[in-house]
Image (cartoon, grey):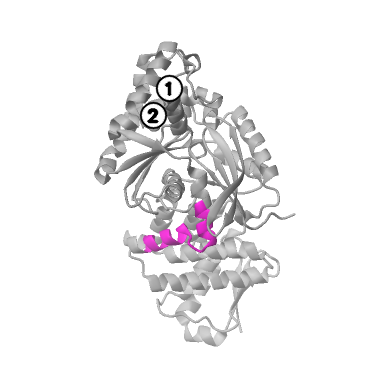
């Protein structure tokens, strides 16, 4: 039984807790109808080599299976699952993700730190409009802390640093907590924040906002101690730190307003927040309920309303790297046509075909960004940028797909064999982009000859391009390039033949 199409679900796989939230959408407005949260303490499972232990993986899979049960009946486009810092840093995450996706029943996007910051800000700005004032948003997670400045829907500065309530609690507060421990944690966090403090201060802000568990728990405990205080202040935090030191632990301090599930990680989050106040010279901070999951929802709505951040990022990259937009549009359109041809010939499911056409559109629009660095080997430069740049809206996996398509669009096909890593569905997309670039080489308006068709060979091992002989006779440059292309695909045991008719 399918779920109502106006329902959306976000899955936030943090370093401390995993969250599932389900919302109903009406005219762009969100109404929460169900939510689940489980303290998985994922970051606590990282050993000294940055490998996740079995216990943390089991806790995560058990939680994801519960989420998966609740999400039965949801279509893929109704769900977005994002994973943050621990997924980014764990060395053995590649082995874990397939199991996690199987348990959840949906793909999991491991997002970069700055993309996490953007999504957090998107959630905050939709629920707390800044009215033209510049706000500084700080989100202390389990393994990373995000810092964002902005005054409208699009942030001006996004930063992510590797300090969080779980990692700092484990690193500094495992035994009896002393003043020395607190000072060591604050100093370590300040050293990290120093990397961005000059830029942040230069950009400036009018007010500060805290979001997520650490900020909310600090606010709640300060308010319980002093009911007139509704914001986080440094003086309020200092009192809490002194109480914890006097008692020797967070648990023994018996802090009012403290939720039991925050006890283990409270000291780490408090030290990071105190460091942020010291280094950025923050006077006070209000706290909002908005968080990463809200940003994921608004991003999903944007995608459904054809306001996809990924399209905006693509356009910005074209500007930044001085791309010839006419040529890029020609290649993107031709690549999608070739993919459509082979997709129909293979009876590819409509959704899968649309998926690859979307990636070929972005890849075609961005395949020449590397020319801004050097024309020789420009596809390698383009691929490197797409793999490593901050690209708002794109997950790491999406950037990897774009990078591979662009790397494979010219040169020796053999280099792609290991990179594609058994994902045979990528080969038709790679060939589609290669042919698009080949046919558009003259950088002039292109009309493919009638009845041009790309399909799989009869044995399913290779590809066949049907095309007009008379057209090839008129375009000897393309005809010669197609012969070279045929030689390339022989090298990877996927014959590509041209049937001229």
Of helix, strand and loop, which mostly describes the magenta segment?
A: helix
Q: Is residue 383 visible?
A: yes
Q: Residue at x 52, y 39 (%)?
A: 87
Query: Is the C terminus in the top left, top right, bottom left or bottom right quadrant?
Result: bottom right
Identify which residue, 190 or 135, lies in the foreground. Answer: 135
Q: Quadrant of residue 466?
A: bottom right
Q: What residue is shown with label 2?
A: 229
Q: Residue at x 66, y 34 (%)?
A: 62
Q: Is residue 423 visible?
A: no
Task: State the image coordinates of residue 280 (x, y, percent, origin top left).
Answer: 29, 35
Q: Quadrant of residue 236?
A: top left
Identify which residue, 270 or 95, lies in the foreground. Answer: 270
Q: Is residue 367 above or below residue 180?
A: below
Q: Is residue 366 above or below residue 264?
A: below
Please say whether residue 417 is one of the residues in the magenta stretch. no
Task: State the image coordinates of residue 375 (x, y, percent, origin top left).
Answer: 34, 63
Q: Is residue 385 above or below residue 438?
A: above
Badge 2 marks a residue whose secondary structure is: loop
Q: Are marks 2 and 1 in contact (CB under 8 Å)?
A: yes
Identify which residue, 204 or 163, lies in the foreground. Answer: 204
Task: State the image coordinates of residue 38 (x, y, percent, origin top left).
Answer: 60, 33
Mark 2 packing: few (<14 Cα in 10 Å), some, or many (20+)?
some
In the image, farthest residue toward the front: 228
Q: What residue is shown with label 1?
A: 225
Question: What range of the chain is rendered magenta?
Answer: 298-318
| Side of 434 relative to 281 (left or right) | right
How far apart are the two marked residues, 2 and 1, measured between alpha carbons? 9 Å
Q: Quadrant of residue 323?
A: bottom left
Query: Is the N terminus in the top left, top right, bottom left or bottom right quadrant?
Result: bottom right
In the image, farthest residue toward the right: 1
Please say whether residue 308 is one of the residues in the magenta stretch. yes
Identify which residue, 307 or 370, lies in the foreground. Answer: 307
């Amino acid at each position: 039984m399918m779920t109502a199409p106006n329902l959306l679900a976000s899955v936030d796989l943090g370093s401390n807790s995993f969250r599932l939230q389900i919302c109903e959408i009406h005219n762009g407005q969100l109404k929460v109808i169900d939510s689940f949260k489980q303290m998985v303490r994922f970051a606590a499972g990282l050993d000294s080599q940055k490998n996740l232990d079995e216990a943390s993986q089991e806790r995560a899979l058990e939680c994801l299976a519960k989420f998966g049960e609740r999400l039965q009946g949801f279509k893929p486009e109704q769900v977005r699952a994002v994973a943050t810092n621990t997924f980014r840093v764990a060395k053995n995450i590649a082995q874990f993700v397939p199991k996690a996706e199987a348990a959840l029943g949906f793909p999991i996007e491991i997002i970069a730190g700055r993309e996490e910051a953007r999504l957090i800000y998107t959630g905050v700005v939709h629920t707390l409009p800044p009215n033209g004032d510049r706000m500084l948003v700080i989100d202390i997670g389990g393994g990373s802390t995000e810092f964002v400045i902005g005054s409208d829907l699009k942030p001006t500065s996004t930063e992510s640093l590797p300090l969080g309530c779980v990692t700092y609690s484990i690193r500094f507060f495992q035994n009896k907590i002393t003043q020395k421990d607190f000072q060591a944690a604050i100093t370590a966090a300040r050293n990290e924040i120093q990397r961005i403090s000059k830029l942040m201060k230069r950009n400036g802000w009018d007010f500060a906002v805290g979001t997520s568990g650490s900020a909310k728990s600090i606010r709640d405990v300060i308010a319980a101690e002093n009911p007139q205080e509704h914001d986080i202040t440094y003086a309020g935090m200092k009192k809490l730190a002194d109480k914890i030191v006097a008692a020797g632990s967070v648990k023994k301090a018996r802090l009012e307003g403290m939720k039991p599930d925050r006890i283990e990680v409270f000291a780490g989050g408090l030290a990071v927040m105190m460091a942020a106040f010291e280094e950025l010279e923050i006077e006070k901070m209000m706290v909002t309920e908005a968080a990463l999951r809200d940003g994921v929802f608004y991003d999903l709505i944007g995608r459904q309303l054809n306001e996809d951040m990924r399209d905006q990022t693509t356009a910005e990259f074209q500007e930044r790297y001085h791309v010839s937009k006419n040529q890029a549009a020609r290649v993107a359109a031709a690549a999608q046509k070739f993919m459509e041809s082979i997709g129909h010939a293979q009876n590819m499911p409509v959704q899968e075909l649309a998926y690859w056409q979307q990636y070929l559109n972005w890849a075609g629009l961005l395949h020449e960004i590397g020319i801004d660095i050097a024309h020789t080997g420009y596809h390698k430069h383009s691929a490197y940028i797409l793999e490593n740049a901050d690209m708002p809206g794109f997950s790491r996996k999406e950037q990897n797909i774009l990078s591979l398509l662009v790397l494979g669009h010219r040169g020796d096909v053999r280099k792609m064999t290991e990179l594609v890593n058994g994902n045979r569905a990528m080969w038709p997309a790679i060939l589609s982009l290669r042919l698009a670039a080949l046919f558009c080489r003259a950088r002039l308006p292109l009309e493919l000859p009638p009845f041009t068709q790309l399909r799989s060979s009869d044995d399913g091992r290779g590809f066949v391009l049907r095309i007009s002989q008379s057209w090839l006779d008129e375009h000897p440059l393309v005809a010669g390039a197609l012969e070279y292309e045929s030689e390339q695909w022989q090298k990877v045991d996927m014959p590509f033949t041209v049937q001229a008719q």
